[in-house]
Amino acid sequence: MVEQSFIEAAQQRTLCKITDKTGKERVVEPYLIFLPIKRELMFHTYQISPDEGWRNFHTIDIKKIELLSEVFSLREDYNPFNKKMFQIVLFSIPTKDGRKKVPFGFESLYL
C-alpha cells in the first residue's frame, strides 16, 4: 500500500522514490496526505528530481514508493495549515518549528 510507505518515509524524514503508472520516477520529500474538494486522496511533497519544487500527486496514480536512505530537513515554507489547499488533512509531519496539523482520523488506519 503506497500510503503506508509514504507515511513511513515521512515519519523517518527519508527521501522516497515514487513511480507513477507510466513508469516515471521522481525523488521527493514526503510531507502530507490530504483530500481536496474533489475527494481524491493526494500526497503533498517537495520534489527533488527530476526538477525541484512543491508537488501534489494523486495516490491512485502512484504505482510504487521506495524509501531511500537519505534523510531530509524540514523546509521553512512547509505549511500544513493552508486551509485553501488542505481542506482535510489525513496525515502530516510537524513544521520546522514543531507545529502539527491534527489529522482528520486517517493516520490511525495505517499505524
Image (spheres, grey):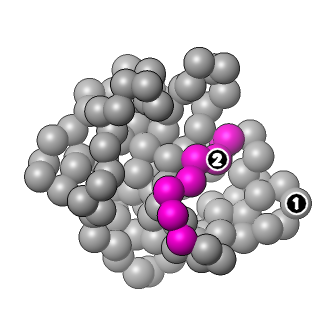
Magenta span includes 57: yes
The secondary element bearing badge 2 is classed as strand
Residue visible at 76% across and 46% down in the picture: 61
User: Residue 74: image x %, image y %?
Assistant: 27, 63
Query: Does residue 62 appear in this view?
Result: yes
At mark 1, the secondary structure is loop
Q: Residue at x 40, y 69 (%)?
A: 14
Task: Specify the principal SS of the magenta part.
Answer: strand
Quadrant of the image occupied by residue 102: top left
x and y percentages locating residue 8 in the rendered image: 43, 55
Please provide percent x and percent y for residue 65.
Answer: 63, 61
- 55 to the left or right of 31: right
Q: Amino acid at mark 1?
A: Thr
- Outermost residue on the bottom side: it is 70
Residue where numbered disc 2 is placed: 57
At label 2, the amino acid type is Phe
Q: Which mark is residue 50?
A: none
Kindly tell me whether residue 67 is visible in this rendering.
Answer: no
User: Which image quarter holds the C terminus?
Assistant: top left
Q: Nearer the viewer, residue 39 or 6?
A: 39
Residue at the spot 51% in from the left edge and 64% down from the top edge: 53
Span colored in magenta = 52-59
Residue 103's quadrant in the figure?
A: top left
Quadrant of residue 19 within the rendered picture: bottom right
In the depicted structure, whether residue 80 falls above or below residue 72: above
Residue found at x 15% / y 41%: 99
* Mark pair 2, 1: CA separation: 13 Å
Q: Is residue 84 left or right of residue 71?
A: right
Within-10-Å neighbours for mark 1: few <14, some 14–19, many 20+: few
Q: Nearer the viewer, residue 70 or 5?
A: 70
Q: Which mark is residue 22?
A: 1
